[in-house]
Image (spheres, coloured by chain):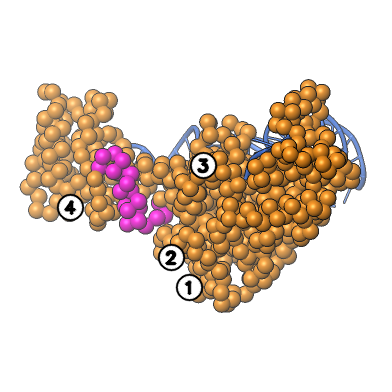
Amino acid sequence: MPGARGEGGGRDRGRRRASPAGRQLRHVPLRARRRRANEGPDGDRPDARPRPRGALPDRSNRADLDVRGVAGHGRPLRRPPSWRNLRPSDKIRHFRRRQPGFRTGGRIRGARLPLRRPLSVPSAGTDPPKRGPRMSDVVTRFAPSPTGYLHIGGARTALFNLLYARSVGGKFILRIEDTDQERSTPEAVRAILDGMTWLGITWDEGPHFQMERMDLYRKEAERLLREGKAYRCVCTKEELDARREEMAARKEKPRYDGRCRDLAPGATEGKPSVLRFKTPRTGQTVVHDLLRGDVVYENAELDDLVFLRTDGSPTYNFVVVIDDASMGITHVLRGDDHLNNTPKQVLLYEALGYPLPRFGHFPLIHGMEGGKLSKRQDDVSVTSYREKGFLPEAMVNYLVRLGWGHGDQEIFSMVEMQDLFSLEHVGKSPSKFNLDKLLHLNAHYIKMAEPSLLANLLVPFLAKRGIDAKPSPWLIAAVRTLLERSRTLEEMAESAEYYFRAKPADPKAAAKFLTPEIAPVLLEIAEAYSALDDFDADMEDALKEVMERRGGNLKIHQPIRVALTGGTASPGLFEVMRILGRDEVVRRLRGAAGRIDA
RNA sequence: GUCCCCAUCGUCUAGUUCGGCCAAGGACACCGCCCUUUCACGGCGGCGACGGGGGUUCAAAUCCCCCUGGGGACGCCA
């Protein structure tokens, strides 16, 4: 399952406890800001008493409409509901961020970019530096292997890399790790690029492909050999496997025993061989991890890794090192599953004479059943969420909250994330993927989205149900009635069905509400409606009149609803009628009445 | 098995870096109530956690140690 590694396609996992040395990224300004934010409520309140549990801050200055939209996705949104729960200081910050021209200079607010177009990040530099220089020399990267789709864990790895780079004004590079010719496919490359673009995870440079760099790898491999830092190994796969089994049986850590390490130079002549790295047998290698502090490895625990295969192709650990070094990656941020690779890579950096980047390993995302995300039990492909009708804003918002937090804030736009993100607030323990929360966020973003936009997005989902709809004012109106009751576009399309065709009434609902005594009432309403001049304006009164004529408290709403929609749950009755239009309403009323056996 | 990482409500997390402001805050889910022509939305309330044991300290969710539990890595995959 190589596509599922934290490096790129990866899942992620691990919690906290770091030696001070590891916490290099301390940004005083940020902390100061947080402190200020925490003091906000009391400072702003006349009584300065702690707010009782459950009480809300003043919301008189609440502004509900913000049409500027979720940056990063170019989708207009209203003010997030969490707005009302924000501390005053946060509100101010929020407000400022949204002011045109305020802190927006230079940065291309997550605009969707055509693939492959290098986006040299900020320009003008009109922003005051927030923490550190706006333009910094930080370079991060996402390096998936194109063996499948874009994996959820990989997407988060990519996101964190992007966010970290942006938060410090650095650069984010996309690199495709296609050394595995057997399994790498152009379709997979496409899928990864599409997935990232859909999510709004845009890269500043690339994609670069490793296969284009073969010569470099060979050259560096030869250099290691020449310098005596590597050796040829003629052990066959079968021999290796057998030895590994033996070691496992002896309860040892299975690893290469180094028997070819000191072979006489001529001894490997004419035999197929690989190149192995001479790992020091003594001493320690320490990884200074940005999130975990110093992690110390005994070199004796490390393997003599093969870095050039029999066929001359380089292996992962070798290639990443060369690529990261030659691309000037300053921060290698990836899933926890790579932590144990890191000392080997550190040794390689040293042997090759490259400057060491900083490393940061964040915890993996676990599946709903615990353990790493598995294809079997969990939906791991970004595409599948797209197809189920999730919005990219919701996905990204959900992913960023898996492992990262900013106080009590739950809703983040891409812009906010880029501003607020910091490595010190990335947790260390793995998190479980939780569909309910994703659904909740999706529902939120659907509610906030511009109906016209949703209408466009909804069309393919309607098509999937055999409904040939086109974006129109009518569709938008229909969407508007469904906004608050749909958690995904798929759900919305499902509920929208009765707007397009009369559905057979649900038997239970029909039995309960479409009773013989109700039939004449439905007919009477139909008659009243067909006589109206202005249906939209008078339908409520007309219904009232019929009810009065029928005397008192006749429960007629549910029967009408069932007649119109086929079910007992729908938007407001009159909303539905307005969408359907008078003729269709009359038709369905009569139809329902006719189907009732007297 | 060996090595490495991790440990706050069922879940995601705030709080841990500088121990006191935490009888632990928010969100999802769940349960009530209110709103209501249904379903939702929304509002209000409830349930619910510092894994255990030792230290250090006037004071520990926060610092140290051990245990337990969870996860990851051990490839001519990435």
Tell me the number on the disc at residue A562.
Answer: none
Mark 2 or 3, nearer chain start = 2
The Cα–Cα distance between marks 1 and 3, rounded to whole angstroms, is: 41 Å
Q: Which residue is mark 2?
A: A68
CA–CA distance in space, label 3 to label 4? 52 Å
Residue at 53% from the left image edge and 51% from the top image edge: A397
Q: What secondary structure prevails in the magenta region? A: helix
Q: Nearer the viewer, residue A379 or A240?
A: A240
Q: Which residue is mark 3?
A: A148
The chain to which mark 3 is attached is A
Contact, mark 1 vs mark 4 (Cβ under 8 Å): no
CA–CA distance between discs 1 and 4? 40 Å
Pointer 2 or 4: first along the chain = 2
| Discs 3 and 4 lie in a common subunit | yes
Task: Give the chain letter at badge 1.
Answer: A
Q: In the structure shown, which secondary structural element does the residue marked by tag 2 occupy? A: loop
Q: Which chain is blue?
A: B
Q: Describe the element under mark 4 as helix, strand or loop.
A: helix
User: Which residue bears the numbered disc 1?
Assistant: A100
Task: State the mark number for residue A536.
Answer: 4
Q: Is residue A408 left or right of residue A538?
A: right
First to last magenta residue range? A447-467
**Do badges 1 and 4 share one subunit?**
yes
Comes first in the chain, label 1 or label 4: 1
Give percent across and percent down for residue B44: 51, 46
Question: In the rendered view, does A98 fall on the left or right side of A572?
Answer: right
